[in-house]
Image (cartoon, rainbow, N blue to C red):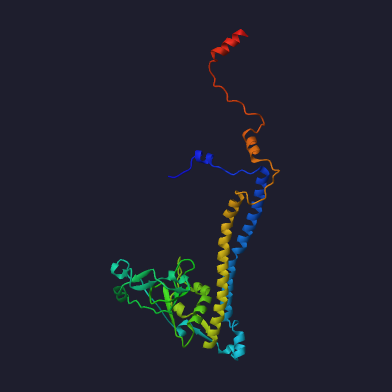
Amino acid sequence: MVNLNQGILKALEIPMPSLPEQQRIADKLDALLARMDACRHRLDRVPGILERFRQAVLESALRGELSSEWRDSNSVSMLSWRSVTLADVADVGTGSTPLRSNAAFYSSTGTPWVTSAATGLAYVDTAGEFVTPAAVAAHRLKTYPPGTLLVAMYGEGKTRGQVSELRIHATINQACAAVRVDESQASKAFVKLALWAQYEQMRALAEGGNQPNLNLSKIKGLAIRTPPIQEQAEIVRRVESLFALADAIDARYTAARAQVERLTPALLAKAFRGELVPQDPNDEPASALLARLRNPAGHEEAPPARRPGRRPARARAKESVI
């Protein structure tokens, strides 16, 4: 077990400035570190602000507010919007999990098999597992094409209700609903935005005890208000533009947060190099301070005491003469 001992610690060399300079360094560090803490506090509010901004954009889009100018310029009325269910504009299915005890059902290559854990990203480009033709045949697994939307019906934490989009051909497990939008009825991109906007509503629909889940009937019955196809495209364009702005701010936040975390060790290193505060030639040298620390009473160091024992013969002879 690697460890430090007292000898190593006592031998550590520490740069020692004068006492007044130590105080100046400490005061400067206190002021700078307080400003950094305030900066961290302000930065930590950014993710929440961006999340609320994205949600507000989605809600505005689905209420028709985001495209109101477009409707005015194209003489389109809100009366052209219609209320439908997801089953009206899309085919909704699911998958299953091949028997885990059958080694012939899984391999390192084959058909990608996607679970609800993959829905945390906007797009699914890879799969963590692959199933064999035997698994596909035995469990009648359907291979869904790129462009299929995936809705997580089960999952811990934030997973349930998440929506992603396949960019590969893949099968899925029973924890996902596969939504294939009929593009003649609705834009796939618009339906994806509508599902994103209903994240909390979908989670509230879940049933069960310790792990509430959604089911296909609830997913199929989700209500969506759809404008004409041309307005759907305009809404998608405006939402993507605003989301790109939010993503750029998010990237700047990430860079700023990393920079703040690097500042504390940089400040301490600068302080112990004597570069943080100006030095004063009138300060008492640190050697005088160390001398006082060794001898706080201000007396000269006494010679080492003689070990008790019998006095030397010369001392005894001198004593007898006196």
Q: Position of residue 141 (x, y in %)?
A: 34, 76
Front-lying residue, 287 or 304 = 287
Q: Where is residue 75 in the image (x, y as percent from the top left)?
A: 60, 91
Q: In which quarter of the image is residue 154?
A: bottom left
Question: Is residue 39 something that shows in the picture?
Answer: yes
Location of residue 127 by image quarter: bottom left
Q: Would you say 309 lies left or right of 32 here?
A: left
Q: Which residue is drawn at 62% across and 85% down?
A: 69
Foreground pick, 63 / 68: 68
Residue 228 in view in this figure: no
Residue 240 in percent (x, y) is at 54, 78
Q: In the image shown, does 34 or 279 lie closer to the viewer?
A: 279
Q: Locate residue 112: give its quadrant.
A: bottom left
Closer to us: 103 or 21: 21
Location of the N terminus (image quadrant):
top left
Residue at 43% from the left image edge and 70% from the top image edge: 118
Question: Looking at the image, which residue sits at the far front?
Answer: 281
Relative to 279, does residue 245 appear above or below in the rendering? Answer: below
Q: Which quarter shows the C terminus?
A: top right
